[in-house]
Amino acid sequence: MALGSEAWALRLVHTGFRMAREQGRPWVAVHVAVPGWETAGEADQARVWLQEAQDLGAETVWVRASTVSEGLIEEGGKRRVGQVVMGKNRPRGPWARLEHSRAQESIRRSLGVRIVTLPMDSPVPGGKAKPTFADRLGVVLAVGTILAMCCVFASALSVAVGFPGIPPVFVLGVGFIAHKWGRAFSVPASVAVLLLFDALFIPTRFPFQQEDWTNGVYLAGTLILVQMVVVLVDRLHQETRSLRRREAETFLLMVLGRALGRCATAKEVAAVLSERVQGLFQAKAWLLVPGPGDTWLHLPESQEVPPCPRPSDLLPQFSNATVRADPFEPLFLDASSFVALAGQGGAEGLLQLRLEAGRPFPQESWGLFQSLAVQGALALERVRWLEEAQQARLDTESERLRNTLLGAVSHDLRTPLAAIQGAATSLLLPEPLPEATRLDLLAMIRDESERLARLLSDLLDLTRLQSGGIRVQKEWQLLDEVVGSALLRLEARQGPLPIRVDLPETLPLVPLDGALMEQVLINLLGNALRHAPRSPVELRAWEEPGTVQLEITDRGPGIPAEFHQRVFDKFFRMPGDLQDGGVGLGLAICGAIVNIHGGAIWVEDRPGGGARFRVSLPLEGLPPEQFDPETCPLTLECNP
Amino acid sequence: MSQPLILIIEDEASLRRFLVPTLANHDYQVLTAATGADGLAMARSHNPDIILLDLGLPDLEGMKVLQSLRQWSRRPILIISARNQERDKVQALDLGADDYLTKPFGAEELLARIRVALRHATQVVLDAPVLQCGGLRLDLERREVSMDGVPVRLTPLEYRLLEALAQRAGKVATHAQLLNEVWGPVGAGQTHYLRIYMGTLRRKIEPDATRPRYLLTEPSIGYRLNVE
């Protein structure tokens, strides 16, 4: 694989990559630096292409040699090369063609291998078109006009100052032609000038003398000189321009690389790419990643989404690279260009590019755009790896959590089971038990199985709450009702309870999930009763702007400040907590439920001793129309 | 009255093992079916007085069994279901099931539910149009409500609501059923109406509105007028 520094060398790299992949062989990318042939900018560019080749799995070589073929022969001799791939411009003129084939011949003979040359003439569709006949005619007319004007000026000047007035006029004219249309037009123009000078000025104004010859030669010499100077200066300018452009491109790519390096998600990559493309090419760009089903996910999502073929229509055109000259070549469909963003692990996505209507893609930017696509692909790949690593870490963590859960729960499951089993087996013994003992054992079986059932449902609730398996179904309702049903459930379990409830009748409707919030109240009240058995427990609620506040207070031992946060952790039990069947899930469940309601739960020290649990529930959304039940317009014919 | 016949459609053997002796011991005749198809066949051949139906059956969905039963039978059907199936319970109740039991449940609860369901089945119309439970007395004919002998003044809608609950005394009434009976079609989906009226009704009837004894809430499902 022989590389130059031109923009099309990137296509050569990609073609080499594809050929090597198809043939399943390793490949080497070689750049032959011929001293005096390339500028520093071109050498840098060549390094970029070599880097690209290396990214695509090639071994890369940089050799210095007096000619390209010599360098290739030297490198090829070091390894067993099977095939040489070269790109070529269409040789200009017979001399270049001859030289080219001679170089190929020498490589073929020296290495004994097949040589593939790839024509690289029109690297980009939509590039500069060949000048048409009409264009040429226009230029010829323009040149003729300039010369005619020069003649008029020159003859006017020659009347005034004689011969010295003529050359500067023609020098200016020919210099302009050379600058504007190149030597192809300025050389014929010079010949025309000499002929005109010969025909118009010599016979009429000056009798043909020895002096005329000198003047003619002087004029011719000046014209040749001016053309050389103009062409040289132009070339210098061009080179400076392209050098500056490359420098700017390198800088842009560096900035892009840095911006992409900071991206952690595909969305961010898409945002960076889209912003850069907009800035560089004044075109809109989207990153396409395969979505659910046969759809594309257009990123970034904020922009309006352009029409786009389905993945099943679009992808085969990219994967079927054998029929395409270049796997990285863009596809033009539906007024958009698509470029595959291919990393080492295959295509990561597509870049869809939409230029403003009718504007062709600037040819000189094509290399830059491809580099951008390549960088985008690498960034996407990195992001994907990052996500995979993240997922792996999450999996490990949830595995660990499961183990902790099993460890913590197995003890709590076994205790009631042991009691049930013991009681049941002793009831089944042939020796009759005293009636009181029998009833006691039976009651124990009932209580322990209830405890088991509670533990199991707590566990299930918590798992589902935390995995998002429970969807909160908020309905506007009165807190009284939830409190009432929670108290009822608690009292059914434990008999009459010393709980004082203070709910003002003016409380608004609150959007909440009745069943879940009831669980919160049961857990909080249950905790208060358990830890402060002899103190009265109070439940109060009041409205604050945008929220309803609820508090449950007791006069028990309270909770030390250092545990105010941790009491809401799973399986957290306060040191010295009584072993009464709690497993440390109750408050964790409360936290999860309040959390999915968008509220907050916390615990404070109650002034004067005891714990104060606070719940704040947001009054979000539009409350249903309130009406006073007593003056409701719906009335019925009845006599209560 | 002879021993009522109970059909249990339940696939779990251990639950059947608990149900059969418990019910037999309380003077019920018991039939069991382990699948929905068997259950439907037995219901047709034996015409049981009450059916206990598990919603989670292996072959047919419990809901399908319920629908086919309701096509020809008006006998009470009690749903047995697991926790966290509130949606299914509501659907089953709206499809014509009479009440539900949530696993795990105790024998007392089971027997109470069966008693209520059977009583309703035998009293197509309340024989005496007076409902007395605890201190609450509701005279449906004279439209009078009293609590411990003290008359309670209700608005027409509150009365309609109490009446709708009394029609199913002891059984659960879903939000949708109550809304439909009290407000008619305009009430559909307006659960908050129901909650507000239930709140005012409780304040008038219950001795302690935060600890209701008569008007019980079934979270996410509906309400029940307690007659026990």
Image (spheres, rainbow, N blue to C red):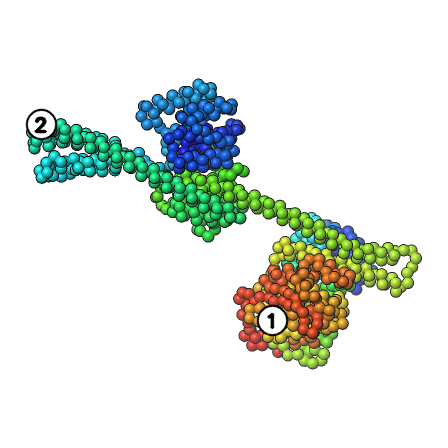
Q: With respect to residue A407, does A30 lie above or below?
A: above
Where residue B99 appears, x then y in whole percent? 69, 62
Mark-to-mark CA distance, 2 and 1: 124 Å
Q: Residue most toward the right?
A: A431
The residue labelled by disc 2 is A209
Task: Determine the secondary structure under disc 2.
Answer: loop
Q: Quadrant of residue A48?
A: top left
A248 sits to left or right of A200 = right
Task: Determine the secondary structure under disc 1.
Answer: helix
Where residue B104 appears, x then y in whole percent? 74, 58
Circles 2, 1 touching at the beta carbon (< 8 Å)? no
Q: With respect to residue A318, does A115 lie above or below?
A: above
How packed is label 1: few (under 14 Cα within 10 Å), some, or many (20 or more)? Answer: many
| Residue type pointed to by label 1 | Ile
How packed is label 2: few (under 14 Cα within 10 Å), some, or many (20 or more)? Answer: few
Report the residue at 56% width, 77% height from top. A631
Query: Disc 2 sits on a residue from what chain?
Result: A
Where residue B25 appears, x then y in whole percent? 83, 60
Q: With respect to residue A588, does A16 lie above or below?
A: above
The residue labelled by disc 1 is B196
| Residue type pointed to by label 2 | Gln
A137 sits to left or right of A523 = left
Report the number of numbered marks.
2
Q: Which quarter of the rendered picture does the C terminus of chain B lie within?
A: bottom right
